[in-house]
Image (spheres, helix red, strand yellow):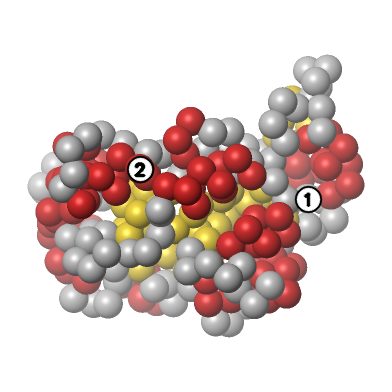
Amino acid sequence: MALANRPLITAHTGCEGTPDNSLISIDAALASGADVIEVDLRVSADGHPVLHHDSSFLDSAGREIRIAERSRSELAEGFQTVATPPATLDQVLQRVVGDEIILNIDLKDVGGVRELWRQIGDFGLHQSVIFTGCDAAGARFVNTTVPGARVLLNVADGELPESEQGYDQAVREICATAAAAGCCGLNVDYRRCRPELVTFATRRFLPVSVWTVDHPDEMRRMYAMGVYAITTRFPVRLGAVLSGKPE
């Protein structure tokens, strides 16, 4: 349950030392008290959502299996040869039904979003999902293909300069891009996030989520900055930091 006046805690996939996109990771996130759970999503050759970060994986024989080139059934067979197979989307959705948790689906491929949205709807979870991983073109595609979805604009490396020079102008351009693409917020590398961004974006109804914040000092800095959500691989640690408990 979210506490008032603090950022949402987003449990990065693979949180608390668990395998990425696994049911173990989902269970660890739920047990941590996180508000949001992240998973990565790609699309099989036959258009089905598949939970995986990279575009390929190695089976037990060391052969590379490219996700976009295999059917869902072929991928399921290949995943059974790895140490910890990724969860299926249905397994994850079943885990979060009836909970107040938000599912953050990091879209590595937007091409299967129509089928993805259908499966989410089968569980009555349209209001419990947020999409990340999208540039402006990807966000426009999602918003056009499945109206009613909520999409954050991912701010790419290089869009926000490291130095102060040009930062304010970049912030204005990013917020304008997000609004034009129909995004409901920004998803930013915490190392590029400054108070100017949070203030400007928030005043334009574009809350800022930052990733991936694992050190307590940086967690406190983001909290003080007023970000809306913090993604971390250590949600238990972040919860302690935000509540002021000793680590």
Residue 101 visible in the picture: yes
Where, quadrant-wise, is the C terminus in this rendering? top left
51 or 182, nearer to the observer = 51
In the rendering, which numbered label is found on residue 236?
A: 2
Rendered image quadrant of residue 59: top right
Q: For residue 7, what is the image quadrant?
A: bottom left
| Residue 227 badge | none
Say what secondary structure mark 2 lies in. helix
Q: Residue 113: horizontal and vertical position, in percent?
A: 66, 66
Viewed as shown, does residue 103 lie left or right of 160? Answer: right
Q: Given the image, on which type of amino acid does mark 1 rest?
A: Ser
Q: CA distance from mark 1 to mark 2?
A: 33 Å
* In the image: residue 150, left or right of residue 63: left
Q: Position of residue 235 (x, y in %)?
A: 37, 45
**Nearest the camera: 25 or 196?**
25
Q: Residue at x 25, y 45 (%)?
A: 240
User: Mark 1: which secondary structure?
Assistant: loop
- Give the total of numbered labels: 2
Q: Position of residue 61 (x, y in %)?
A: 83, 17
Q: Quadrant of the N terminus?
A: bottom left
Furthest toward the top, the residue is 61
Neighbor class of circle 2 (other Cα within 10 Å; few <14, some 14-19, many 20+) is many
Q: Is residue 53 visible?
A: no
Q: Which residue is mark 1?
A: 44
Residue 39 left/right relative to 35 = right
Give x and y (percent) for residue 163: 14, 42
